[in-house]
Image: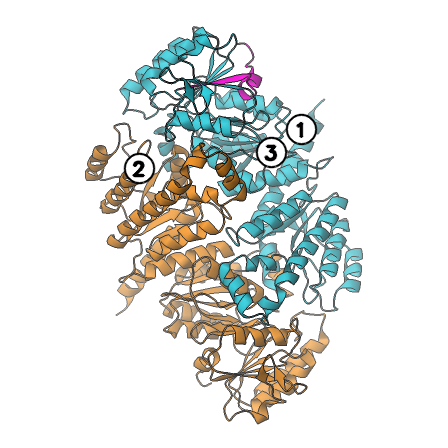
Chain colours: A cyan, B orange
Amino acid sequence: MDEIEFQYLFNPRNICVIGASNRPNKVGAQVLTNLISCKFQNDIFPINPKHEKIFGLKAYANLKKISNYLDLAIITVPNFKVPAVLEECIEQNVKFAVIITAGFGEMIGYDPNGFKLRDNILNLLRKGDTRIIGPNCMGIACTESNLVGLMGFGFPPARHKINASIVSQSGTWGITTMRAGTIHGLGFSKFVSSGNEIDLRFEDYLEYFGTDPDTQIILGFIEGLRQGRKFIELAKKIEKPIIFIKGGKTKSGREAAKSHTGSLAGSQELYDAIFKQHGVIEVNNMAELVDTGRAFAQCLSYDPPKFPRGKRIGLSSGGGGFCVLLADHIEAEGLIMAQLDASTIEKLNKLLPPYWPHRNPVDLVASWQIGSYTKVIKILLDDPNIDAVITRPPIGFSLIYDNNNVQEFARENPFSAIGVSLEMMKDIDLGIVRGIGRMAQKSSKPIIIPLGFYTAEGPKQYEIIREFLTRGVLVAPSGQAAARILIKLYDYYKYQQRIKNEKP
Amino acid sequence: MDEIEFQYLFNPRNICVIGASNRPNKVGAQVLTNLISCKFQNDIFPINPKHEKIFGLKAYANLKKISNYLDLAIITVPNFKVPAVLEECIEQNVKFAVIITAGFGEMIGYDPNGFKLRDNILNLLRKGDTRIIGPNCMGIACTESNLVGLMGFGFPPARHKINASIVSQSGTWGITTMRAGTIHGLGFSKFVSSGNEIDLRFEDYLEYFGTDPDTQIILGFIEGLRQGRKFIELAKKIEKPIIFIKGGKTKSGREAAKSHTGSLAGSQELYDAIFKQHGVIEVNNMAELVDTGRAFAQCLSYDPPKFPRGKRIGLSSGGGGFCVLLADHIEAEGLIMAQLDASTIEKLNKLLPPYWPHRNPVDLVASWQIGSYTKVIKILLDDPNIDAVITRPPIGFSLIYDNNNVQEFARENPFSAIGVSLEMMKDIDLGIVRGIGRMAQKSSKPIIIPLGFYTAEGPKQYEIIREFLTRGVLVAPSGQAAARILIKLYDYYKYQQRIKNEKP
């Protein structure tokens, strides 16, 4: 089989929306308006014989009247009409057809008609070169070409210096991940919802993302793979971080997967072994995926990439309880509490009050000034026994104010601790971010900050997260998450080193 | 020893702030202004010989000139001055002294002077009836008396129909938990930061919360217990949900704990065994504590309490990938995927398109209307094979708009899927909340909703969470969290049943 020209899928010279509609709640309208409003760079051709114009664009009755070359068709017509429009795509040599429509036998045992339609499509495929994405998928996206060819509520995904691409066997899951990632500071290159994989499969997209120069990180949701051998080869070959969620890890999950895309979920032990042997990073939920992906993006944004080169962690925090919990998480996640070097203890003796704990974790006790706080971090980063630092700064007090009740309270009680500190707290937060940012830039070791906890204090928290991210500082929603991310970064680094050494 | 009159600690007739200060950044000012601004109901006496008035209140040079009975003194003077003011407290028969000041030997090995001061205090204690909280603690709080006797940024904790009380061996951790809980819909009765536990100990507060009629749930952070036998007796005796985080579960954590409050963390196996045998609920991080506490509060708000009476879970969701992951979480957390009753399948056949999966989880496929959605939930709740329902509703699309970029995008692209749907989505969200709320009220089985993921979409998410909570619907930040909460609710129910049966 010829090489798949994926550049025409993600950077097409034109897109036909077959089944384009004027009615906003129709999928054909969603796809079209998503393409228009997210500013796809090239031609968009709505296909619908009943209209002359749709959302301001000239509509076409069929594909024949449009252009000599057609790169991409997105199909949203009802399932029984799909074979006919696909036949037209093949006749017109359309390179790729994304079939969003469902109803092709994916509900095993309850849809004999869908099975027949599926066979029709498979027969058609043999007649030409058109390649199919889906059916029963949510579509594709690409931030280089401003292509948001998705059903549902399309919104431009974020694009940063380092970008991830998503291949997902669950469309809803994939789109939700991309939206959450965009909110949480992760950049994206490409997205594909692979659907029933009647033609192109998970492994094909994975292969492309592995070579695509615009993809630095690969994220995915797997229910069941159809080409195990190819997957193993790819996992072996691709040197980019591959971070997957595997659905169907339990018997209950596998049974649910069977009645979903009709894929075979396969033996979980096999997946575990393949992932482990070939450096595939597995996470357990969406939040972990986004947080981990973002941390990899941060590490990769440095040249050379700034991964932890060992498992020895230096900790600093204010609040003994947090120190204890952080130390627990370090050990529980397989990291090591660094033994402070004698030179570090000497430096900290000069900086901290005499009763500081003289060991790792460094409880900052009474020395809660910004200046000494960042100095402690610098001292830890300079310690030859430390590979990475987790630090819980006295940050985020300005976040307390991101709540109507608190603001009202501060206004009504200007003399209270909360009342007197409103403006001051913002300055303190910014001062800490800048101080840690400077340390991060200068050091070859990563710093990660456990910042608040899930849904903690709203949009202001994103501001602080963004400030850290723009300065190359890693963030995590909790101490546990920080430890979990660091061990994954280290494992990836170690795996890459091993691979390099094994190469001739 | 006489019974401890805790009512005078949490509902004192007056509070002396020893070391009260006019300077806002001083702890003595924080405590005083927290008491004033949070509207403590009874007398507050600032003690400071250098001032006539502090924050508008008449100041006193010492305790002698104030009143015949003094219930509570909060001490914020430097450590070397503490023995003298404590002696005064004892002479004046103050019932309780909260010593916030640190520096009493808690940093083992590096503070010989602190150890001496500690011995001074212990000697003084024998001379009178004054009981000590701390030293080296963050203070106490009580929502019945509007008492916020805390250092730092005091803010009134939330108070609901069902309230939790916190006893914490880490002050910062405890206060952060109370603030996070307040934001996330958990109500509180009392809070105590137990500090070095020179006199009153974790077990004493636990004992009181066990009998306190205003405390329905007990939350705590343990580093190390000093009265193991008493703890076991209390765990056995108290029938309220007790939810703890245990710091020092690993060797690294235990070593960090040693240099913190100077407590002995003890064997983790022993704690695990005690917790398990006596129905103490253990969680691993703050988010889990708040979420679990809130779920218990929701269950207890019904009469009789609405706990799951079995482990068989009915699932419904839109999006096959989410169904697979939910099924995985169910099994991984020790719950059981319910087998749908024949009557349920019959009812769903009438409601859903023919290709619905005919099994649990119920993937709602194309039937995404609010009406059929809530009908599916009702059908699942009525199934005799189902003990609780996890459902991931098509909710929260209005949350997408809680982002400046999205709002701008919607305004600039009024024809896009996002643009046309702004107002509609709010109605849909509210419709779903109301529909599920009605089901929850009528059923004897709990419903729990995995809603977004951590820090997902900001303040609007709290609005939806609050709407669910006021209707007695449980919420969780993810499918995994939902499953983890349900098994804890069930384990508690089962434990209580066992205890009841064992009683003569």
Image location of residue B434, percent across then percent down: 31, 49
Q: Chain of mark 3?
A: A
Question: Distance between the Cα atoms at labels 3 and 2?
Answer: 34 Å
Which numbered circle lies on residue A499? Answer: 1
Q: Secondary structure at mark 1?
A: helix
Amino acid bearing label 1:
Ile
Question: Distance between the Cα atoms at labels 3 and 1?
Answer: 30 Å
Q: Chain of mark 2?
A: B
- The answer to whether A184 is drawn above or below residue B194 in the figure is above
Amino acid bearing label 2:
Gln
Q: Are marks 3 and 1 in contact (CB under 8 Å)?
A: no
State which region is magenta.
A1-18
How packed mark 1 is, by other alpha carbons closer than 10 Å (few <14, some 14-19, many 20 or more), is: some
Q: Are marks 3 and 2 on the same chain?
A: no
Front-most of residues A148 and A322:
A148
- The answer to whether A299 is drawn above or below residue A240 in the figure is below
Q: Is B283 included in the stretch rendered in magenta?
A: no
Q: Which residue is mark 3?
A: A159
Question: Distance between the Cα atoms at labels 1 and 2?
Answer: 51 Å
* A87 lies left or right of B307: right
Q: Which residue is mark 2?
A: B369
Depth check, mark 3 against mark 1: the one in front is 3
Q: Chain of mark 1?
A: A
Residue B152 showing in the rendered view: no
Q: Are marks 1 and 2 in contact (CB under 8 Å)?
A: no
